[in-house]
Amino acid sequence: MEPCFFSSINTFITDPLTHDFMRKALFMSSLVAAVCGFLSSYLTLKGWALMGDAVSHSVMPGVVVAYALGLPFSLGAFIFGVGSVALIGFVKQKSRVKEDTVIGLVFTGFFALGIVLVSKIKSNIDLHSILFGSPLGISLSDVKQTILISLLVVILLLVFRKDLMLYCFDPRHAKTVGINVLFLHYLLLTCLSLAAVVGLQTVGIILVVAMLITPGATAYLLTDQFDNMTMISVFSAIISSIIGIYCSFWFDLETGGSIVLAQTFIFLFAFLFAPRYGIFKLKKFFSNYK
Amino acid sequence: MDKPNYQTHRIEAENICVDYNGKVALYDANLRLKPGQICGLVGMNGAGKTTFFNALTGFVNISKGKIRINGESLRSAQKDQTIAYVPQSEGIDSQFPVNVWDVVMMGRYGSMNVLRCPRESDVQAVKDAIERVDLINFTSTPIGNLSGGQRKRTFLARAIAQRASILLLDEPFTGVDIRTEKLISELFIQFKNEGKTILLSTHDMIHVREFCDLVLLINKTVVAYGETSEVFTPENITSTFGGISPDVLFGPES
């Protein structure tokens, strides 16, 4: 068989789709990427990148404990995610240690606890899949849970998207006009924990923070409109997932790493060529030639 | 619109204290303002001006004392959109991806439904507010592309769109152009005639003399409070600024 160029492109795209696990992986990763991408607009604008890192690492012991007790892993992750933030707030308030130090200190502590628990609780938990994700081996019950959580997060973000935008932009004004700022704070935190849980399956705990900040950062370079920013963010996240999964299929690469790397390349592209905010300021360049 | 009740005070702050994790930022501060009064808030950096604003907007909780707005609690004042806060220039992220229209519309959020869908009346209020601050040609300009003065006017428009009866302005004249300064001064006179109450912090002593009926000098607590002509004396200013004479601060004619 000597395929011509177009048919080989065709094979390149359709061949992976003949496998059931690949279709599932593509669907799940795109869904998770969309959810994380949506949220990442808020996190980058709020300046919560480090918080995203902290929460996503801190969910580890929660996942392990939940598995061991036979509870839904999202519940355990959620408790530890929110718990870590509460602890960060408490330690910061009660000591003279600076905030970034406290964040680093708390989340590494939680993360280490998770790793120790995995080694102690001898069960069928696969440390590798928690750390690096396993989008190709998602079980049916995990699929259901992920879809459910994703829907929940998307609905919450859609309903409160303007309030959350205001909360990120000017919390004082929000408070002044009677909007419950504390509620929005915990809402964003809840969404963050939940997104970390679903993101964990596709790219793993270590890289999930990339899903939560890179698409937002990319979109931030490309637009001055908040709604456009969320859309670009979601779109670039989905594209990265598809590119990443195809690359991992054809070149036999680690899937989670490929997805994040694809996101990083898209960011790099925006960083260089974004019309207004890119290094090369293409908009200015072209308007000079008009 | 609520009818201004000239019997009650718009703002009543009684012996309020604010501390951040045990560090006292403001103590035993009192303030009473009536409708149509403009009061200048004067003090050094770190004297508690922004803390005072934070307490009046409810952004920080007071540890002692009482705040009544139009004779009611702060909570109900927030619900009624009574208080508008215009932040100082450094207090906002100017790179945030929103345009003038979006920011002014935020003034209406508190009176919209949960999804914050603008009604016809909200759109009209925003349009009117933008017209009053003379930014009608900039409605879709991202705030990052505005000058300092235009950005200040945008936030003033947000307060106008909110239809608040109390305006709190943190350094409204810092970093603005002459045109904006003139426009803001004119708006203040209009607000006064509409019966709004204004509390503004400023570093510029000339502005205080120009249009503040009252002045509140603070240095962690109230140093002096009253009619500008009586209270705004070199002695009081000196003690507000920790013993530095007003000559050094504002030139010899003070």
Image: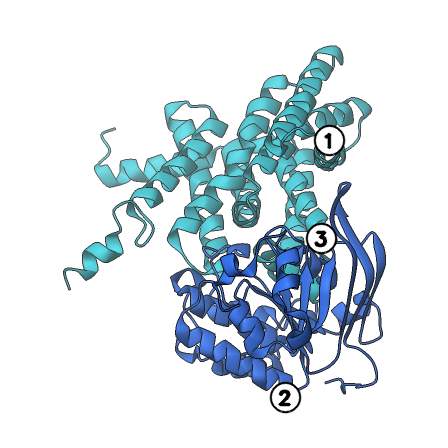
Chain colours: A cyan, B blue
**Circle 1 residue:** A91
Visible in this render: residue A173?
A: no
Question: At numbered mark 2, what does the secondary structure look like: helix, strand or loop?
Answer: helix
Q: Which chain carries label 1?
A: A
Left or right relative to B184: residue B197? right
User: Label 3 is placed on what type of residue?
Assistant: Lys
Q: Which mark is residue B220?
A: 3
Q: Mark 3 lies on which chain?
A: B
Q: What separation in Å lies between label 2 and label 1 (alpha carbons)?
A: 50 Å
| Pointer 2 local density, CA inside 10 Å: few below 14, some 14–19, many at least 20 | few
Are labels 3 and 2 assigned to the same chain?
A: yes
Q: In which quarter of the image is residue A136?
A: top right
- Closer mark to the observer between disc 3 and disc 2: 3
Q: In which quarter of the image is residue A82?
A: top right
Question: At numbered mark 3, what does the secondary structure look like: helix, strand or loop?
Answer: loop
Q: Which mark is residue B193?
A: 2
Visible in this render: residue A263?
A: yes
Q: Mark 2 lies on which chain?
A: B
Seen at 61% across and 71% down, the residue is B107
User: Label 2 is placed on what type of residue?
Assistant: Asn
Seen at 60% across and 62% down, the residue is A162
Q: In which quarter of the image is residue B91?
A: bottom right
- Closer mark to the observer between disc 2 and disc 1: 2
Nearest the eye: A85 or A55: A85
Name which of mark 3 and mark 2 comes first in the sequence: 2
| Pointer 3 local density, CA inside 10 Å: few below 14, some 14–19, many at least 20 | many
Nearest the eye: A200 or B23: B23
